[in-house]
Image: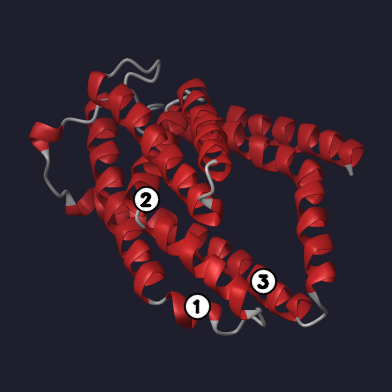
């Protein structure tokens, strides 16, 4: 909305506060994951060996959580300003580093630890890319993150939190559903669990286009509202909605 209103300075303030929140909350999540991993995994009906693999993997991944916060907050800021290319390149690089490093380490006998290290390094690399484009303002969004002007702006943080709390509730609900289903399916045996994991991946082919189209819908609606043009905002919603229905129905 700030970009739609042509308030570039305020948009940069929002970037700063989003990064502060992203790093703070992701760091707290990482600490909970690292030190509370046994409590998190306790409801799962896992074999001792599987439990050990999961604990090892998640504790290593927990160390990369601050970088995930940087990348997620930075990507969403750029998308909100209309730049979806840099977030795409950053996530593509995350996957390339992840697959390359993980494959190399597994080949040298590091197993699950190697996969976890590859995943963590992927997120670190992606965060570095996003941070670079925000600090240099070389993204097409022209947003800028100025470390020298680091400060907390409580009115902007309250505005972000007000918008973010419903999204947090949505994500938490999805996470709880997945955990509950995982716990139920884990009681049916390892073969069923393996089938479930594969099916969830295939299922993504149907619903991922909806998530993809949600990004331009969010960006366009926010910018048109900022411009004071609710008619075009509604039109953007309708077009994205229709495309999502057509694509998801076909893939489904």
Question: Which of these two is toward me, 89 or 153?
Answer: 89
SS at mark 3?
Answer: helix
Name the element at disc 1. Answer: helix
Whole-percent x and y of residue 74? 37, 36
168 or 37: which is nearer to us? Answer: 37
Horizontal side, residue 49 vs residue 248: left or right:
left
Please tell me which of labels 1 and 2 falls first in the chain: 1
CA distance for labels 1 and 3: 15 Å
- Spatial distance from mark 1 to mark 2, Cα to Cα? 18 Å
Q: Residue at x 42, y 54 (%)?
A: 163
C-alpha distance separating marks 2 and 3: 25 Å
Look at mark 1 in the image and give the residue it sits on. Answer: 40
Query: Which residue in the structure is indicated by mark 3?
Result: 177
Q: Nearer the viewer, residue 34 or 66?
A: 34
Q: Is residue 142 above or below residue 167?
A: above
Pointer 2: what residue? 64
Tag 2, which secondary structure? loop
Q: Residue furthest left?
A: 148
């Amino acid at each position: 909305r700030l970009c739609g209103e042509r308030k570039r300075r305020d948009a940069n303030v929002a970037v700063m506060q989003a990064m502060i929140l992203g790093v703070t909350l992701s760091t707290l999540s990482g600490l909970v994951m690292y030190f509370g991993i046994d409590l998190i995994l306790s409801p799962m009906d896992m074999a001792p060996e599987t439990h050990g693999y999961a604990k090892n993997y998640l504790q290593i991944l927990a160390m990369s959580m601050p970088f995930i916060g940087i990348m997620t907050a930075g990507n969403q800021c750029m998308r909100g300003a209309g730049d979806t290319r840099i977030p795409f390149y950053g996530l593509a690089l995350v996957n390339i580093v992840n697959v390359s490093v993980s494959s190399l380490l597994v080949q040298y006998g590091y197993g699950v630890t190697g996969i976890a290290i590859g995943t963590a390094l992927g997120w670190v690399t992606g965060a570095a890319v996003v941070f670079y484009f925000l600090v240099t303002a070389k993204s097409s969004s022209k947003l800028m993150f100025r470390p020298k002007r680091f400060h907390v702006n409580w009115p902007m943080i309250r505005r972000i939190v007000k918008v973010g709390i419903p999204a947090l509730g949505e994500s938490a609900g999805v996470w709880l559903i997945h955990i509950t289903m995982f716990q139920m399916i884990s009681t049916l045996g390892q073969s069923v669990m393996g089938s479930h994991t594969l099916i969830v991946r295939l299922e993504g082919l149907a619903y991922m286009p909806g998530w993809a189209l949600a990004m331009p819908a969010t960006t366009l609606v926010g910018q048109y509202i900022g411009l004071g043009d609710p008619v075009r905002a509604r039109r953007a919603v309708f077009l994205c909605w229709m495309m999502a229905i057509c694509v998801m129905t076909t893939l489904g």
